[in-house]
Image (cartoon, rainbow, N blue to C red):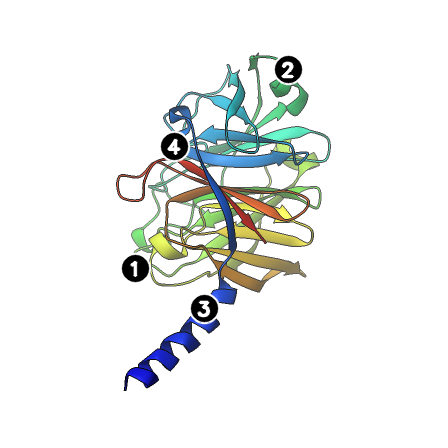
């Protein structure tokens, strides 16, 4: 019997191992980033980060071990609920002030800032682009239609993409995917492109908490895994999945051009202090 149990364990371990991301290293983050919610790579040499809603409207420039190199305040914007950050091909930063836990915000916002300004001065102003989701018709929405919170913003194919976070009760896992070409950002005409269901167990396991892009892929994370998506004819198909080495409150992701993934964990009373963790795709 012991032999059978051992064989069963080894089989399960062998099957599970390839499904994990390759952990490399973890770095503690400054107390100033205890609610880290957005992360982005700049030229594979520095990182940009920001905190969640209710904190100061500050962008942090970090080295690749998470140490703070400088800070830059956005003086004309409030951090209502900053959730993610991305950069376009023209060195413009976009911050998604798109957190909407209760689905009752009538307008969420995109902030646009020059990357070069953030890297050289201590205070900048942002262009602010409010928008609403065309499919949201009540504030708040009914409990079974809470699909309009979001924590994921990605630049790809000359457009911004938002993957919403499911908060529906009962939970069905549905994430709506919205997009807008950068050139149309001012008119706010976001379009629903598709919907994705990463899982149906619970929002703590199956809701997107951040996203980024790598080569042809959209990379979306939940608290326990990373999912690769490929877009074909505006439909999103799962390419692969990888689990993280352990469950944590992962709220931000960035990836280098060589496939090194950086994930930011918020401070959590059970899972530990804020950290930057490095993985290999």
Which residue position is annotated with label 1? 170
Q: Position of residue 48 (x, y in %)?
A: 56, 30
| Residue drawn at x 52%, y 62% as measured from the top left | 241
In terms of secondary structure, where does tag 1 sit? loop
Total tally of numbered discs in the picture? 4
- Residue placed most toward the observer, 247 or 161: 247
Q: Quadrant of the C terminus?
A: bottom right
Precedes in sequence: disc 1 or disc 2: 2
The relative height of residue 2 versus residue 28 in the rendered view (above or below) is below
Precedes in sequence: disc 3 or disc 2: 3
For the residues marked 3 and 4, what is the alpha-carbon distance in whole angstroms? Answer: 31 Å
In terms of secondary structure, where does tag 4 sit? loop
Precedes in sequence: disc 3 or disc 1: 3
Q: Residues within 10 Å of mark 3 (few under 14, many from 20)?
A: few
| Residue drawn at x 38%, y 63% as measured from the top left | 200
- Residue placed most toward the observer, 39 or 129: 39
The relative height of residue 149 versus residue 34 in the rendered view (above or below) is below
| Residue drawn at x 33%, y 41% as measured from the top left | 102
Q: Position of residue 274 (x, y in %)?
A: 38, 35
For the residues marked 3 and 1, what is the alpha-carbon distance in whole angstroms? Answer: 30 Å
- Residue placed most toward the observer, 273 or 227: 273
Precedes in sequence: disc 4 or disc 2: 4
The relative height of residue 214 versus residue 67 in the rendered view (above or below) is below
Q: Quadrant of residue 269?
A: top left
């Amino acid at each position: 019997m012991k032999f059978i149990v051992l064989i069963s364990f080894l089989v399960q371990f062998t099957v599970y191992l390839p499904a994990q991301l390759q952990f490399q290293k973890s770095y503690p983050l400054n107390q100033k980033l205890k609610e880290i919610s957005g992360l982005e790579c700049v030229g594979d040499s520095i990182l940009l980060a920001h905190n969640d809603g209710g904190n100061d409207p500050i962008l942090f420039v970090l080295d690749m071990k998470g140490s703070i190199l400088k800070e830059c305040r956005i003086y004309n914007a409030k951090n209502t609920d900053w959730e993610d950050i991305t950069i376009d091909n023209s060195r413009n930063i976009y911050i998604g002030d798109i957190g909407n836990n209760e689905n009752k915000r009538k307008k969420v916002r995109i902030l646009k800032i020059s990357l070069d300004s953030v890297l050289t001065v201590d205070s900048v102003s942002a262009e602010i682009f409010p928008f609403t989701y065309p499919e949201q018709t009540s504030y708040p929405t009914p409990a079974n239609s809470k699909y309009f919170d979001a924590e994921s913003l990605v630049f790809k194919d000359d457009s911004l993409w938002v993957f919403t976070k499911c908060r529906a009760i009962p939970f069905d896992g549905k994430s709506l995917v919205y997009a807008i070409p950068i050139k149309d950002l001012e008119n706010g005409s976001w379009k629903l492109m598709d919907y994705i269901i990463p899982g149906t167990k619970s929002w703590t396991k199956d809701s997107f908490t951040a996203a980024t892009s790598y080569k042809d892929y959209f990379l979306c994370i939940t608290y326990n895994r990373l999912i690769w998506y490929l877009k074909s004819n505006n439909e999103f198909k799962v390419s692969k999945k990888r689990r993280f080495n352990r469950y944590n409150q992962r709220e931000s992701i960035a990836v280098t051009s060589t496939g090194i993934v950086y994930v930011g964990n918020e401070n959590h009373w059970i899972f530990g202090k804020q950290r930057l963790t490095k993985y290999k795709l």
